[in-house]
Amino acid sequence: SRGLRAVRKTSCLLLMSLVTLDFSEEEKNPSFWNAWAQRTLKDALTLQVLNRNIAKNLILFLGDGMGVPTVTAARILKGQLNGCYGEEVQLEMDKFPYVALAKTYNTDAQVADSAGTATAYLCGVKANEGTVGVSAAAVRGQCNTTQGNEVTSILKWAKDAGKSVGIVTTTRVNHATPSAAYAHCVDRDWYSDGEMPPEAVQAGCKDIARQLMENIPNINVIMGGGRKYMLPENTSDVEYPSTRGTRKDGRNLIEEWVDRTKDKRGYYVWNKKDLLSINPSSVDYLMGLFEPGDLPYDLERNTSMDPSLTEMVEVAVKILKNNPEGFYLLVEGGRIDHGHHEGKAKQALHEAVEMDRAIGHAGLLTSPHDTLTVVTADHSHVFDFGGYTRRGNSIFGLAPMVSDVDQKPFTAILYGNGPGFKLVNGSRVNVSTVDYQQNNYQAQAAVPLRMETHGGEDVAVFSRGPMAHLLHGVQEQNYIPHVMAYAACIGQNKDHCQKGNSAVRSSALAPPTLGLVITVTWLLC
């Protein structure tokens, strides 16, 4: 795949050299756009025969905080990283044939958080902000509202149906998104008992790390960060000795997991070398915890110690494919959200591009004949870009004019609020005096906040594979796992399922024509 990426980059650079000479002239000709649209129409007509196969495998890619403006900006960045203008390039998710919009509000919040939304797209019910794996009858922080209000996730439905299941994230494995797959907790911040109020512990509520070990004890693949929440508070981290565990109950959950799986083809790894040295075909259980907390941003990742999201996804899929009954895999690009919260658009967008690379790689390891893949976000951010920038303008660059109010330049990327609000002598910072292209530059914001906030608009839902057409229109976010379960004949709605119905329909899954292959290749740049 590295060689293919190199070829694509070379092709883009070659095309850019041609573009400089005559591509803009070609775009002036109506036939250019008409021909492009007709090719797209021809491809769309092939979708009239629907893929109604039973989904053997289910993959959900969740870009935390990946609103539509982030998707668009990541597309441009992907193209520019490959020497293109950027706007004309396709993300891997752009190639999915079906797109819907999901309404992200929580039951008690117009602008949602990642916990309540995770309960929606994993458990199928809307919930209150700050809570995971419990219904809206549970109140955040009130331990006594947990019991009786638990809701199960599609990961559990898949496991109960005999499938292998996995979780891969760039955050802590007990962060909001992954925790809704296995935990029932009235506070998303109860990572270990060290973060819980004593009265909640005494009342019998369990921390999220403990629930990862106990609620669904046979999750096949668990990868991300979060080592410190698994270790006793007097135990040093294997990689950073000055970092200690946070658990007050004295339990070493990593050792417990190793003891439980050592005779079941189970492996624990904490660095990239050990991860890539395993043979996925001889592994049934894998836990990879690569940092005490969240994994580093991809731009800052120690490439010799920490795996990329794409590398983790590749290993996860290969292990999960060992099960002839199929699998369910949750993949979170969790640090898109963190980059935006910090006002660091460059970090956020590079995280989104890396997740898109993982989507493409998963597509090479599976088939749309029997694998339903869904890509979506939990919520958006108050991130946007504008300013009448010219075609091919660096996504991190300046708008082509200065403000007609303070006569200062501004970057195309701006935030509605956040830490990028800065004044010098009572007026806006002149961005031409700072390095606005650096990795950790905080884009200017309209309202000063220590942390930028989520946005409330709908998010995109991209889908491909069996029953993907059911993800259409504008839907409630909790609709997503119901469609995925229906496609795989798991969970509560299985009346439509019949033995032998998973046979591939050749009419629905005809191989691409040469013209389509040429079109896709051309659209890479």
Image (cartoon, rainbow, N blue to C red):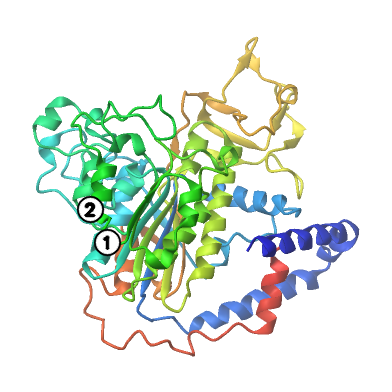
Quadrant hosting residue 517: bottom right
Q: Position of residue 487 (x, y in %)?
A: 33, 73
Circles 2, 1 touching at the beta carbon (< 8 Å): yes
Which residue shows up at 70% across the image and 25% down it? 431
Which residue shows up at 44% across the image and 30% down it? 240
Can residue 66 be seen? no
- In this orientation, which residue lies closer to the viewer: 226 or 176? 226
In the rendered image, the quadrant that contains the N terminus is: bottom right
- Crowd tier of the residue under label 2, counting other residues whose Cα lies within 10 Å: few below 14, some 14–19, many 20 or above: few
Q: Position of residue 344 (x, y in %)?
A: 57, 33
The answer to whether 364 appears left or right of 257 in the picture is right
Q: Which residue type carries mark 1? A: Lys
- Reading the image, the residue beneath label 2 is 260
Give me the C-alpha separation between circle 2 and circle 1: 8 Å
- Considering every residue shown, the one lying at the far right of the view is 21
- Up-down: is 429 above or below 327? above
- Crowd tier of the residue under label 1, counting other residues whose Cα lies within 10 Å: few below 14, some 14–19, many 20 or above: few
- Considering every residue shown, the one lying at the far front of the view is 263
Can residue 152 be seen? yes
Quadrant hosting residue 386: top right
- Considering every residue shown, the one lying at the far top of the view is 425
- In this orientation, which residue lies closer to the viewer: 247 or 420? 247
Q: Which residue type carries mark 2? A: Arg
The answer to whether 256 appears left or right of 314 in the picture is left
- Reading the image, the residue beneath label 1 is 264
Q: Position of residue 504 (x, y in %)?
A: 42, 86
Q: For mark 2, give the secondary structure.
A: helix
Which residue shows up at 60% across the image and 82% down it? 512
- Up-down: is 450 above or below 219? above
